């Protein structure tokens, strides 16, 4: 389940990145950083 959750976070991260580069958006960038940190925490927790 944790692995599936991490996959979802990675997909979300890609979508946010696309939005961020599509047009400058500080909120999207902040969310991207937040998701990266959350994903890293989830992956670290898994191992």
Image: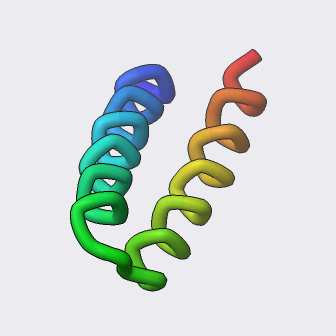
Quadrant of residue 4 in the image? top left
**Where residue 14 appears, x then y in whole percent?**
33, 42
Q: Quadrant of the C terminus?
A: top right
Count of numbered tags: 0
- Residue at (47% x, 83% y) in the render: 26
Q: Quadrant of the N terminus?
A: top left
- Residue at (68% x, 23% y) in the render: 46
Above or below residue 30? Residue 14 is above
**Where residue 8 appears, x then y in whole percent?**
32, 37
- Residue at (49% x, 70% y) in the render: 29
Q: How is the image coloured?
A: rainbow
Left/right of residue 44 with respect to residue 28 in the rendered view = right
Quadrant of residue 43 in the image? top right
Above or below residue 42? Residue 2 is above
**Where residue 5 appears, x then y in whole percent?**
40, 35
- Residue at (23% x, 62% y) in the render: 22
């Amino acid at each position: 389940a944790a692995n599936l959750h991490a996959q979802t976070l990675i997909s979300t991260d890609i979508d946010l990145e696309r939005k961020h580069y599509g047009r400058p958006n500080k909120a999207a960038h902040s969310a991207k950083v937040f998701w990266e940190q959350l994903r890293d925490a989830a992956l670290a927790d898994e191992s």
